[in-house]
């Protein structure tokens, strides 16, 4: 989207650019968000992105085909012949990853757990995006006391350890006892509440930056309605950092879900398989030297989080010109300004500083450049290829 | 030509003075302008030693006052969220008591009054430092802090040391060897660090070092014999390392340290993953800034550019965000303490959760919220102290 | 070391400090390599100022940076940059250096002054430390000596009270002072060559004059050669002894400053010089048949479109700080079909005034009547119908269009908002007409903003502003981000449309020469007040206010002989003021 704009700042009519492929039409395939990022990436940065995508795709497939892959149900403790599974049996022929103290098949539970994790992420991310984006848009555009109150609340919630908040939410939503969908929904909702502030802050920062930009001002001058400005200009332009935050938050969502499960606030074993719960059960096993009940679900968590995080980090690197390994032609031609942080940024009131700095961490590095980006645009023509 | 040279040499000073007295430049796009050159204008009139300005104290005061709404909001949210499930007594004793008995207890504890009344009473009690009394073992929540706070503090400090050493060290190496093998390796390590749930890492560490290799204890803060030793102390601090030093007994100290290694490593690495990323990103972005390029153009060596010129500016955002990670560290402490049966606030929280003692849970959660707010404040002040733009 | 860099036959003449020999630089990108400069050749004599002029993309900055090999890793160079050693022990080829040798050469033989003084000073170190850092890099260790040198050089560049302020941080200085400090950092190393890359572009014109004086000082007192990169012909005329003209990566012409200005050989140089706005030059526009266009009516007879009485605009101060008064009780009127030029430096309140007229900025006091609506305390509902009658052209051609919308969608926005058309598709024909009116091909309507150049974008911006045929147009620095040749064309177009449509216009700019070409009347703003206000000729030729005089005198004239006299005049004015 607007990466495109950044990458193809060109000075028309310059023969030095005509030979380059930047001016040529781009095939539609490479306009898809991820495909485009793949094509920009080079070297091991590309390796990271590809590895992340492969791992993530693998887990998605496992989640979809769990019934086919898993030899037993997640709450099955008896074989088809009615004979109970052995308890705490080491990995072997009948149960390739062994069984738990309760007689569950570790492999099956790990496979089914993928499904739970994926569903919880989807619910959590979808809900928090909608709420966060809406609030951020309104709060950032209108400002005033509503904005201030929302910011203070978001900051307060944000500074709060997210796991504790998720625990509280889990208590409220499910009273701590979970059923099938109820449990997943409860976990999803708890995670949602935790992550709304993140989306809210990112979108708000973007909106505040964009609303000062000349194109929003010019819409205001011609008398465009607030609704038009918000839907036509702000919404589309402010959501470009979302994919990055989205992936990074999905991985945090899995960790939170597992943390809840580990503390016993996840989903009951009879309702669905959940890795955190399985790890909770395995604490006692570990001291007895029974490793398989802990290692497999644990590795599943590590891998899925690793996969999603690799995707998110690579996207972040690619979106941030300062971190990209190699620049696109457009940027070299464009300007040097966008490679600099804005040293003129003065810290104002504390929460503003915090908000600004924080957005670094949550990978919305583009916010920071608010000043810098505008300046870069202004000087694009003046300085074009002068670096 | 010589004529103009003499003149131009004479010109700068008066004009420069004029310039310093100029009004702040307007910033037509960004709305209300900050007032940047107020300070130089004053400085030009009254040259004096460059001391910490009123602006800095204003910053500290403003930042301090911000703690109040933050804590207030958290208390409110926690209170109403917890009470939305119903009263804590039925949650805790639900099936076990007869309805009449339950009703009587609820009435005695005042949980049948309107919610808003209970809320204000809770706030009032909070101002006196009263966080409520646990249902299960009937002790004031504030005494939990006294008994178990030190353990959590000790774990947090040790993990923070691990995180700082690993995070800053590896982060700077990654930034230095940016886009090379070492960088890629460190980044994957960092991602692994925070992709691994702290309790899983804890379990793996226990499995390897205590079950298989049998070199480190698997749980607790000390062995029984050490506990006996501590009983001799007149004024135990609760921080076992300091207590061990007080005793001056090497065995005790080694025992305490052996118990602390695995938990602080597990929690420290989790945080280190975030720190590596944070340090790397910020050092790289300052390293790419114009002032680094300018210093390079004057012949400053790359090594010095990296270790000095880009490190200090990068430190400001790094410290601020590190402060925010304290919150994450405390959440991680809950899980770590549970995994290692490290008897701190987190371990107690997890126990009360299992016992469905929501009064205790609420108290501990609010306690942690207050700690986080205060820590964030301190960290912000520290980072402001490094930043001359806030200091002067 | 000298074996590797000094060759048997010297490449430099006796009076030559540096020679750029067939220099080419290309950048690797993901789309292949781009040649930024190609076969650049020129010499820098000892103790002279060489000006390199060129428009955006001419490769002038890359050339300067190549001299100290300050290029990104993706750059590939060929050719040579020979530099005479300062100690007289022969010469070196900068491009052949690497590692430690390169590091030692930087700053020692040639030092650089950058465009943005605000961003090249490290915000968390004192300026003294930063000055000393360059000396430390070149082997000076003694603490007392370091400090003495830092204080001394600060005094030399005109920082008052240098002993105290050596311990100040960059944010405690104004923009002009920061640039002095940047120059001090270069001068303290006592290099043979100072590379100044657009050193005055980010500064106000009055400050620019001082910085140029300082660079002359570097030549005359420090004996350094100065290579100054600029797009401003006035700056070249003011300071350069020799001029190199660059265009699209090539040197098109080089020579003595007098030769370049009075006998330009290359066609490009001639065009460039012709496009430079000059004081006293009237802009005449012609219709399609070549007849000069004139306004049919006298603006003085026309009704008043905008009237301000004691207009005051304040920005609320931050916590516990006083409000900032941006516009402080100004009075003015704009008649229909009149062009009012509003001139001022940054911070003068000129943009704020323009924004208030367009309803983008709340009026805090006094009265501002825009097309019959009182803006003090106006409700958006009441003002909205009038918005169709107001156009606004923004300074920044880069961000004035929504990057995700096509030019057609952007230009049609006012038409849709005021329900002249129901959709972009409906408005297509009219948008096409508008684009043709601003001399853009119709086909451009399907392009995205980033696919247009700055000048084209500014034309499209004009098309959008004029889409509803407004009776009032506010142009906020519409040409200051453009190259001079592009600026000339946009100004011409602007004037033509103004005559044809006859809108009232507030033209905001920092450039007196530009405003002199267009405006009927001129207002000069300084620190939120109007210090001078009158007919264009009168303000330009017989300025009464000392500030206006200083502003005029600071503006370099693109004519070396005239500029010399002009500069004397400025110095005389400055002496008077003391």
Image (tube, helix red, strand yellow):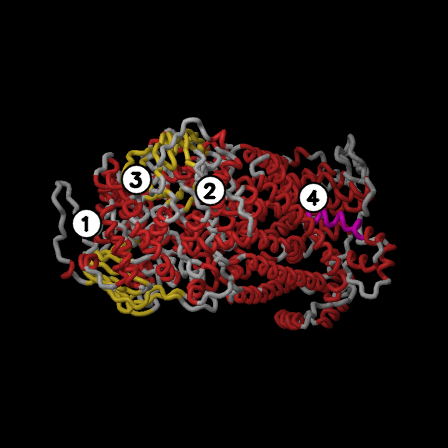
Whole-number angstrom distance, CA of label 2 to CA of label 3: 25 Å
- Name which of mark 3 and mark 1 comes first in the sequence: 3
**Quick check: marks 4 and 3 in contact, CB under 8 Å?**
no
Q: Which residue is label 2 attached to?
A: C108
Spot occupied by residue C182 in the image (x, y as percentages of width and height): 43, 50
Q: Which residue is label 1 attached to?
A: C281
- Name which of mark 1 and mark 2 comes first in the sequence: 2
Compare residues B61 and A180 and report the one nearer the observer: B61
> Per the image, is A311 magenta?
no
In this rendering, is residue B203 above or below B323? above
Task: Please indicate whether residue B193 sits to the left or right of residue B213 in the image.
Answer: left
Q: Nearer the viewer, mark 4 or mark 1?
A: 1
Looking at the rendered structure, the number of numbered marks drawn on it comes to 4
SS assignment at label 2: helix
Whole-number angstrom distance, CA of label 1 to CA of label 2: 45 Å
Residues at discs 4 and 3 both on one chain = no
Q: Which residue is label 3 attached to?
A: C243
Check the residue under mark 2 and report the chain it is in: C
Task: Please indicate whether residue A38 sits to the left or right of residue C514 in the image.
Answer: right
Residue plotted at (39% across, 39% down): C64
Whole-number angstrom distance, CA of label 3 to CA of label 1: 24 Å
SS assignment at label 1: loop
Query: Which segment is the magenta one?
Result: B256-268
Q: Is residue A79 visible to us here? A: yes
Q: Nearer the viewer, mark 1 or mark 2?
A: 2
In the picture, the quarter occupied by the N terminus of chain A is top left
Whole-number angstrom distance, CA of label 4 to CA of label 3: 73 Å
Q: Nearer the viewer, mark 4 or mark 3?
A: 3
**Quick check: marks 2 and 3 in contact, CB under 8 Å?**
no
Main secondary structure of the magenta stretch: helix
Q: Which residue is label 4 attached to?
A: A275
């Amino acid at each position: 989207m607007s990466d495109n704009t950044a990458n193809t700042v060109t000075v028309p009519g310059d023969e030095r650019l005509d030979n380059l492929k930047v001016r040529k039409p781009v095939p539609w395939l490479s306009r898809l968000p991820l495909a485009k990022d793949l094509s920009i990436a080079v070297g091991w940065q590309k390796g990271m992105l590809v590895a992340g995508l492969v791992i993530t795709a693998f887990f998605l497939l496992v989640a979809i085909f769990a019934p086919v892959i898993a030899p037993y149900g997640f709450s099955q403790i008896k074989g088809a012949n009615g004979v109970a599974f052995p308890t705490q049996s080491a990995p072997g022929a009948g149960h390739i990853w062994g069984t738990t103290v309760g007689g569950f098949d570790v492999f099956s539970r790990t496979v089914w757990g993928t499904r739970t994790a994926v569903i919880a992420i989807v619910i959590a991310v979808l809900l928090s995006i909608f709420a966060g984006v809406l609030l951020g848009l309104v709060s950032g555009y209108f400002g005033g006391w509503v904005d201030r109150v929302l910011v203070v609340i978001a900051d307060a919630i944000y500074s709060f350890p997210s796991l504790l908040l998720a625990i509280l939410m889990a208590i409220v939503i499910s009273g701590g006892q979970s059923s099938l969908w109820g449990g997943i929904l409860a976990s999803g909702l708890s995670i949602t509440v935790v992550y709304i502030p993140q989306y809210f802050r990112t979108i708000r920062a973007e909106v505040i930056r964009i609303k000062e930009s000349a194109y929003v001002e010019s819409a205001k001058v011609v008398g465009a309605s607030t609704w038009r400005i918000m839907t036509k200009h702000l919404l589309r332009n402010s959501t470009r950092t979302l994919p990055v935050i989205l992936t990074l938050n999905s991985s945090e969502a899995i960790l939170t879900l597992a943390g809840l499960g580990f503390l016993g606030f996840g989903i009951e074993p009879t309702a669905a398989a959940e890795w955190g719960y399985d790890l909770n059960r395995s604490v006692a096993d570990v001291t007895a030297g029974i490793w398989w009940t802990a290692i497999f679900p644990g590795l599943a968590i590590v891998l899925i989080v690793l996969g999603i995080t690799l995707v998110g980090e690579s996207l972040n690197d690619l979106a941030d010109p300062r971190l990209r390994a190699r620049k696109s032609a457009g940027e070299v031609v464009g300007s040097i300004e966008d490679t600099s942080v804005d040293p003129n940024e003065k810290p104002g009131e504390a929460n503003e500083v915090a908000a600004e700095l924080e957005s670094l961490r949550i990978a919305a590095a583009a916010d920071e450049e608010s000043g810098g980006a505008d300046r870069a645009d202004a000087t694009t023509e003046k300085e074009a290829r002068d670096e | 030509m010589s004529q103009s040279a003499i003149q131009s040499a004479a010109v700068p000073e008066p004009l420069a003075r004029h310039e310093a007295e100029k009004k702040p430049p307007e910033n037509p796009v960004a709305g209300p302008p900050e007032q940047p050159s107020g300070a130089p204008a004053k400085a030009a009139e009254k040259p004096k030693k460059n001391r910490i300005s009123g602006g800095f104290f204003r910053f500290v005061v403003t930042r301090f006052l911000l703690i109040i709404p933050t804590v207030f909001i958290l208390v409110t949210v926690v209170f109403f969220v917890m009470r939305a499930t119903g009263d804590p007594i039925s949650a805790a004793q639900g099936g076990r008591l007869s309805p009449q008995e339950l009703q009587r207890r609820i009435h005695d504890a005042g949980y049948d009054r309107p919610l808003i009344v209970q809320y204000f009473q809770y706030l009032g009690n909070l101002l006196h430092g009263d966080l409520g009394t646990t249902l299960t073992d009937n002790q004031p929540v504030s005494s939990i802090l006294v008994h178990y706070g030190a353990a959590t503090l000790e774990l947090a400090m040790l993990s923070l040391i691990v995180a700082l050493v690993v995070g800053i060290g590896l982060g700077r190496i990654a930034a230095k060897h940016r886009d090379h093998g070492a960088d890629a390796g460190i980044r994957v390590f960092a991602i692994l660090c925070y992709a691994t749930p702290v309790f899983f890492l804890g379990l793996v560490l226990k499995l390897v070092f205590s079950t298989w290799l049998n070199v480190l204890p698997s749980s607790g803060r000390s062995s029984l014999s050490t506990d006996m030793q501590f009983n001799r102390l007149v004024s135990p601090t609760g921080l076992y390392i300091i207590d061990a030093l007080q005793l001056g007994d090497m065995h005790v100290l080694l025992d305490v340290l052996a118990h602390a290694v695995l938990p602080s490593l597990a929690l420290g690495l989790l945080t280190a993953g975030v720190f590596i990323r944070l340090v790397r990103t910020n050092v790289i972005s300052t390293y790419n800034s114009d002032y680094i390029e300018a210093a390079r153009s004057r012949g400053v060596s790359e090594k010095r550019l990296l270790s000095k010129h880009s490190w200090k500016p990068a430190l400001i955002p790094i410290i601020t965000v590190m402060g925010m990670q304290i919150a994450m560290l405390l959440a991680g402490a809950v899980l770590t303490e549970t995994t290692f049966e490290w008897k701190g606030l987190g371990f107690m929280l997890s126990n009360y959760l299992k016992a469905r003692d929501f009064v205790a849970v609420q108290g501990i959660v609010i306690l942690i919220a207050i700690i986080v707010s205060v820590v964030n404040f301190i960290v912000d002040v520290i980072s402001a102290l490094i930043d001359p733009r806030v200091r002067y | 070391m000298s074996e590797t860099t000094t060759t048997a036959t010297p490449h430099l003449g006796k009076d030559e400090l540096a020679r750029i020999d067939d220099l080419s630089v290309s950048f690797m990108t993901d789309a292949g390599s781009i040649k930024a400069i190609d076969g650049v050749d020129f010499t820098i004599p000892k103790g002279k100022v060489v000006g390199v002029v060129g428009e955006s993309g001419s490769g002038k900055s890359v050339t300067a940076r190549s001299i100290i090999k300050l290029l990104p890793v993706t750059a590939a160079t060929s050719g040579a940059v020979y530099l005479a050693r300062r100690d007289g022990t022969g010469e070196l080829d900068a491009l052949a250096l690497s590692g430690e040798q390169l590091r030692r050469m930087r700053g020692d033989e040639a030092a650089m002054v950058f465009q943005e003084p605000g961003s090249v000073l490290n915000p968390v170190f004192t300026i003294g430390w930063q000055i000393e850092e360059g000396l430390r890099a070149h082997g000076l260790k003694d603490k007392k000596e370091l400090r003495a040198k830092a204080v001394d050089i600060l005094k030399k560049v005109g920082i008052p009270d240098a002993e105290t302020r050596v311990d100040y941080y960059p944010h405690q200085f104004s923009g002009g002072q920061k640039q002095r400090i940047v120059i001090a950092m270069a001068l303290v190393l006592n290099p043979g060559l100072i590379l100044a890359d657009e050193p005055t572009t980010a500064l106000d014109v009055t400050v620019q004059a001082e910085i140029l004086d300082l660079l002359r000082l570097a030549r005359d007192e420090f004996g350094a050669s100065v290579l100054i990169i600029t797009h401003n012909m006035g700056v070249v005329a003011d300071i350069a002894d020799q001029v190199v003209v660059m265009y699209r990566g090539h040197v098109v012409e080089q020579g003595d400053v007098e030769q370049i200005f009075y006998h330009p050989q290359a066609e490009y140089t001639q065009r460039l010089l012709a496009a430079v706005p000059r004081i006293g030059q009237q802009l005449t526009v012609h219709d399609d048949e070549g007849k000069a266009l004139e306004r049919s009516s006298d603006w003085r007879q026309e009704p008043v479109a905008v009237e301000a009485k004691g207009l005051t605009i304040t920005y609320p101060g931050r916590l516990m700080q006083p409000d900032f008064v941006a516009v402080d009780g100004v009075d003015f009127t704009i008649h229909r079909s009149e062009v009012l030029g509003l001139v001022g430096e940054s911070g003068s309140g000129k943009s704020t005034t323009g924004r208030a007229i367009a309803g983008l900025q709340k009026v805090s006091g006094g009265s501002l009547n825009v097309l019959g609506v009182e803006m003090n305390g106006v409700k958006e509902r009441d003002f909205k119908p009038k918005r169709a009658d107001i156009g606004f052209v923004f300074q920044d051609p880069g961000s004035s269009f929504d990057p995700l919308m096509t030019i057609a969608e952007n230009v049609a926005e006012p038409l849709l908002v005021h329900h002249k058309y129901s959709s972009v598709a409906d408005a297509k024909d009219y948008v096409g007409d508008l684009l043709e009116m601003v001399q853009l091909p119709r086909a451009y309507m399907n392009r995205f903003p980033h696919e247009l150049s700055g000048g084209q974008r500014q034309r499209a911006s004009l098309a959008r502003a004029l889409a509803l045929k407004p009776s009032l147009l506010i142009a906020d620095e519409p040409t200051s981000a453009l190259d001079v040749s592009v600026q000339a064309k946009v100004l011409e177009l602007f004037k033509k449309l103004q005559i044809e449509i006859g809108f009232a216009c507030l033209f905001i700019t920092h450039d007196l020469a530009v405003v002199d070409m267009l405006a009927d009347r001129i207002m000069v703003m300084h620190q939120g007040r109007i210090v001078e206000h009158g007919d264009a000729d009168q303000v330009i030729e017989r300025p009464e206010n000392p500030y206006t005089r200083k502003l005029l005198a600071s503006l370099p004239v693109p004519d070396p002989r005239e500029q010399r006299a002009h500069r004397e005049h400025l110095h005389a004015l400055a002496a008077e003021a003391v």
